[in-house]
Amino acid sequence: MSDFPEFIQFLYEKYRNLDSGKLACYIPELTKANPNWFAISIITTEGEVFEIGDNQENFTIQSISKVFIYGMALEDCGREILLEKIGVEPTGDPFNSVIRLDENSKRPDNPMVNAGAIATAGLIAGRDPTERLNRMLDMFGRYTGRKVFIDVPVFMSERATGHRNRALANLMLNFGMIGSNIDEILDLYFQQCSVVVNCYDLALMAATLANRGINPITRERAVKSGYVRDILSVMYTCGMYNYAGEWAYRVGIPAKSGVSGGIMAVVPDRAGIAVFSPLIDRCGNSVRGLRVFEELSDRFKLHLFDLG
Ligand code: GLN
């Protein structure tokens, strides 16, 4: 651990000029990101912080939110009921794929792809949209240790242009997979994706999962410890979309990425790690993020199956 500062400095210098990949442009507001932003944060389960780069730069959490909403749905519905409604099978398809939703599928494949995440948002408890939104923001706040907000322009931008997600919701309604209040469900989904975080926050959120659900800085519990296992399992098998297999092979720790350029990974009982860099590859994963995680995993033997 004492080598972390030096090594992340080395990785930061090595990859800061790597400029392959593209900004996500299908959500118009995301094109305003600065392609040079680059940050690496590590927070241990003891609350030690190691970071370098643009750690305080704000961005929307996007798909990384799916992990935490899944945890919330587990608490709201329980494991068995949730499993009846949303599967845990990796798809090998892109995150926004429509192809596996058909008459024969009783439920979306998993909560880390858009279809499953939209269905998960539909299971969040609350009397009305405001209560559900507030519960969701409080939940994120327990992981970040501070109040979180929504980036309204990003939310509005995705709400106005998210036709594909709307199509997924309509298909799932047709197949009886979600309730009929799809506009409310989609709003909550777009809002969860628009929660504003920085790289430090993501590392702390991951560290909270690494620490069995207790935020290592505030000591507050963010999620029941019994559900951490479920969350990490779907992150491990499905968190990196159609790169999940290669990620498991090369890096070997549960992780989740988002199209705004964040990747968050959990080293159980040890640390949360986050990398932020907005240029993403064809699977929707940060290009610099992938390189940094590969090297970190090799250097510190983070791969869960690296038995030495
Ligand atoms: N809000 C984005 C979407 O639904 C999130 C996708 C992502 O981060 N991969 O398309």
Image (cartoon, rainbow, N blue to C red):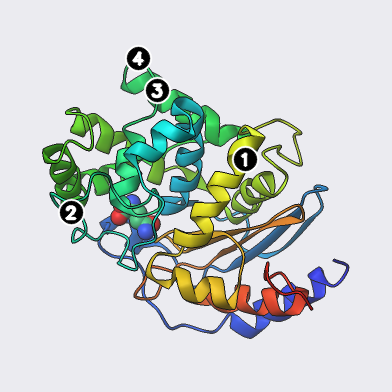
Which tag is nearer the camera, tag 4 or tag 1?
4
Q: Looking at the picture, tell me which residue is in the foreground, 219 or 298.
A: 298
**In x, y percent, where is residue 101?**
19, 53
Q: Which mark is residue 22?
A: none
Q: Amino acid at mark 1?
A: Thr
Residue 87 appears left or right of 216: left
- Residue at 13% across, 42% down: 170
Task: Single out the residue that lies furthest toward the top.
Answer: 127
Q: Which residue is mark 3?
A: 125
- Residue at 32% across, 38% down: 85
- How many neighbours does mark 3 have within 10 angstroms: few (below 14), some (14-19), or many (20 or more)? some
Q: Secondary structure at mark 1?
A: helix
Q: Which residue is mark 1?
A: 144
- Tell me if the residue at label 2 has its CB under 8 Å from ligand 1: yes
Q: Amino acid at mark 2?
A: Arg
Q: Secondary structure at mark 4?
A: loop
Sequence-wise, the earlier of marks 1 and 3 is 3
State how far apart marks 2 and 4 are (Cα): 27 Å
Residue 299 appears left or right of 59: right
Q: Looking at the picture, tell me which residue is in the foreground, 154 or 240.
A: 240
- Tell me if the residue at label 1 has its CB under 8 Å from ligand 1: no
- Residue at 45% across, 64% down: 240
Residue 238 appears left or right of 24: right
**In x, y percent, where is residue 197?**
53, 47
Q: Which residue is mark 2?
A: 164
Picture quadrant of residue 295: bottom right
Circles 1 and 2: CB atoms closer than 8 Å? no
Q: Which mark is residue 127?
A: 4
Q: Is residue 260 above or below residue 7?
A: above
Camera sees residue 289:
no
